Image: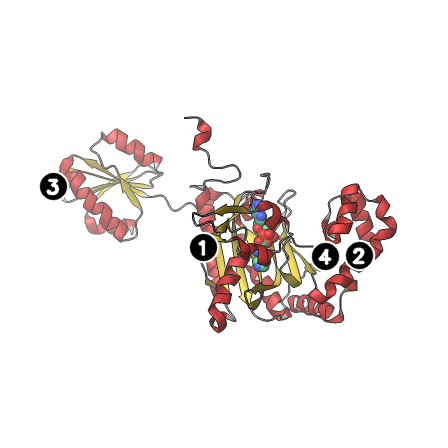
Amino acid sequence: MASSQFQPIQGMSDIAAPDSFLWQMIEERARDIFTRYCFSEVRTPILEKTELFIHSLGDTTDVVTKEMYTLEDRGGRKLTLRPEGTASAIRYVAAGGDKTASARIYYMGPMFRCERPQAGRKRQFHQIGVEAIGAPNPLADAEVIALQLHLLAAWGLADAKIRLNTIGLPEDRAAVLNGLREAIRPRLHELPEEAQQRFETNVLRLLDSKDEAVQKIIGAAPPVTEFMCAETRAYLDTVVETLRNLDIDVEVDTSLVRGLDYYVHTVWEVVHGGLGAQNALAGGGRYCIQIGKNAVNGVGFAMGVERVIAALEAGGISAVQFAPPPPVFIVSLGEAALKENLLLLQMLRKHGVACEMELSARKVQAQMRRANKTGARQVIIRGDSELEKGIFVLKNMGDGTQSEVDLPELMKLLT
Ligand code: HAM
């Protein structure tokens, strides 16, 4: 069989030890922080009706037009592997009516986007996200940002930065598009052709262009907030002020745009210097999503776990640091001891000790080699003669010393 047949699909990865130790740390600390903020977990299906994403993310967004994994099931229904977590979470909330009107939920799991694989961009990636349901309130936005920074610090990423902006209200949109176009129009001829097309189709996308010529012209245009109504600007000011009161300094970056259509008011990204071009660790914002007859309002964010890991690794953190403590290994000499040791193995595990043993009657040297391989800190050696005397030989693999102990002593030393 060609070796490629053993590989996962391009842009998707197996996650195994030792890497999985780091994943577990990330998930455990996230659960701990979310619980302190009174968020509870929701696990929604990975497969949803395609229309859910078209309606909520927007039918002209890159995610919907180019990146979704969509399939037809046997009944001819169009289904999509979730490209993000918000739409499913909101579908769940909308189904619950009043019960979920002020839900505070979190989720973690795989998401799928058929993007061109490159550093920082995967086709199956993982998000850890939260959604706080409720009517627009700048204090709620600030609370969710504070939660996010708390979590980043718990992971060891206190140096991550927030870029904050406002998308404004739907009523602001025409004024923003108009204002931007008028500001750019006199210098339109200086823009590259592709940017000139964007000027017509989606002028907002010019704001986060990496092209220098575009950046120069955008830099000279008034900030988008200048075209927005007083209510929008006051909302943004209150978010920033509330964060300052919480000792959180954020910079408003009016060039920030988000790639999903459901946002209103506050939007933000978390960036980290340890990442390359794809430097967004997380994206978030306030949204209003229409599901059937219900409009659900909320605020939330999603962190990209692979990017969180890249940022941690850039800072010198490695997965082995989070490996569980080394196990105890049991070596048996003879059939009778093998049988008895099986009981000891289970007893130790029931007392919380991680341990392993060789289940076939192999030579002692082979068993010791395996003990070494497992990284065992202590080895219990018991053969028929120890069995008769009711003792155990306990070998410390660190310094090579060994002693004879009885059962109560063994338990005292190991538990
Ligand atoms: P998003 O900005 O599309 O927002 O994704 C959030 C994060 O997921 C990104 O900042 C990035 O870390 C990670 N991510 C996205 N695409 C990829 C990829 N192809 N490979 C690796 N990581 C990726 C959302 O998904 C919104 N649902 C966030 C949100 C929740 N807004 C409100 N509530």
Q: Quadrant of residue 168?
A: bottom right
Please tell me the numbered disc located at residue 388. Answer: 3
Find residue 396 and report its horizontal and vertical position in percent: 31, 40
Q: Which residue is mark 1?
A: 45
**Which amino acid type is shown beneath numbered disc 4?**
Asp
Q: Residues within 10 Å of mark 1 (few under 14, many from 20)?
A: few
Secondary structure found at label 2: helix
Of the residues tagged 3 and 4, which is closer to the observer? 4
- Nearest to N terminus: mark 3 or mark 1: 1
- Nearest to N terminus: mark 3 or mark 4: 4
Q: Which residue is mark 4?
A: 253
- Nearest to N terminus: mark 1 or mark 2: 1
Secondary structure found at label 4: loop
Secondary structure found at label 3: helix
**Which amino acid type is shown beneath numbered disc 1?**
Pro
Q: Along the line of sight, which residue is nearer the eye, 124 or 351?
A: 124
Of the residues tagged 3 and 1, which is closer to the observer? 1
